Amino acid sequence: MKTSQNYISFFWISESINVPTCFSMLTLAIKMMLADRGKYLMLLSGITFSALLMTQQASVFCGLMMWTAGTLRNMNAPIWVVDPKVEEVNSVKNLRDTTLLRVRSVDGVAWALPVASQSLQVRLADGTFKVAQVIGLDASTLMGRPREMVSGRIEDLRLPNTVVLDEYGTTRFRMEGKPPLTVGDVFEINDHEARIVGICKTKRLFSGSPYVFTTYERCLEYAPKTRNMLSYVIAGPREGKTEELVAQAIQRETGLNAYTKNEFFWSTIRWYIKNTGIPVSMGTTILLGMIVGIVISGQTFYSFVLEITPHLGALKAMGASQSLLARMLLLQAFSVGLIGYTLGIGLACLFGFVVQGRGSPPFYLPSYLLLFTLTVILGICAFSAFFGIWRISRLEPATVFRN
């Protein structure tokens, strides 16, 4: 009972000199929590692991979803016109060439340009075959060009047999034992020469293929001939017209699907969530993280409360109210929860820093995900504290002294 006597003495002295109740509660709660280092570390480990698992898996899921819209993020086009059955940017159903003129004729359209998108085989100098996503842009305007060039000039695409390769492709297409590709290197696409005149930065594609940018006409030369070769029409609104209204006008007058960039982005995300197993796979792991946190934290915290029950009973006998003891338990649970949350987020960020340098798996940690994890962790802490509060609510102080 020596420890109980220490807690009783501290409580009595605090009350006698009018130390604020919240301060005494804070000090007593933290001292009780740290007294048993083993259970404290176990509780902290459970919260940390739960926060890490949920944040890491949710960040990989968000990263995968961002990859699905890689083409949209790489091409700065305000309005996208596609086949009526197309719901996501990677499902290309080619359009008739006359579609471009139909879009240009819609009131409110300032400009409309063709884009070709083909998944084609690339043959390297040593005969190795790789797959690339070849994007064909309008040669006169190069609208939809990559945002950032690492080396070379995008305007050199107007030269014969030229392409711009993204940074990922420079390592993906390098030959064994050779350095990454650079400006001036040559490979073949469908038996046609492709000379690199620029290296650009792009967002990764869901399929994992590098991006190769060229002109629209040259992309049609590279690709096997089919009846329809136009993949998308990108357009812009006239001054004074909003993208949403112009997109609605295009859809109404042509019968095609017309999306703003933001609408097409979320339509793509929804399609992958609905039609792939990614949400189930990632969601299962996130759910397991929550269950692990609840089970370990709840069991450990309840065991901790059982150990300090005599101390709580002694404080209750000295006049500590039920609400005061409940706040002490909540403080203990939330303090270890916030520490575990911070450690878990830190480890998740370290994971993201490491894998981003390697390029895979994808990792994207938005601010709302941090808030989601914090909410779940605080919920786990509240759940754990509930059992302790339920325990002390049934505690009779006399039993402590009787035992």
Image: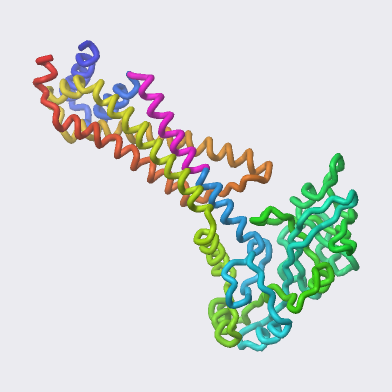
Residue 182 placed where, x, y %? 85, 51
> For residue 236, what is the image quadrant?
bottom right
Residue beneath the point at 63% across and 87% down: 106
Residue beneath the point at 68% across and 42% down: 358
How many numbered circles are shown?
A: 0
Residue 100 placed where, x, y %? 70, 82
On screen, residue 361 above or below 396: below
Residue 349 placed where, x, y %? 55, 40
Residue beneath the point at 63% across and 67% down: 91
On screen, residue 160 above or below 276: below
Q: Residue furthest top?
A: 2
Q: How is the image coloured?
A: rainbow
- In the rendered view of the protein, which quadrant contains the C terminus? top left
Q: Is residue 127 magenta?
A: no
Residue 95 placed where, x, y %? 69, 78
Left or right: residue 376 compared with residue 76: left
> For residue 90, what is the image quadrant?
bottom right
Q: Main secondary structure of the magenta part?
A: helix
Residue beneath the point at 62% across and 74% down: 79
Left or right: residue 271 compared with residue 234: left
On screen, residue 303 above or below 175: above
Left or right: residue 197 compared with residue 283: right
- In the rendered view of the protein, which quadrant contains the N terminus? top left
Q: Is residue 54 magenta?
A: yes
- Between residues 61 and 378, which one lies in front from this camera angle? 61
- Between residues 256 and 245, which one lies in front from this camera angle? 256
**Highlighted magenta segment, given as a residue range:** 36-56
Left or right: residue 229 compared with residue 341: right
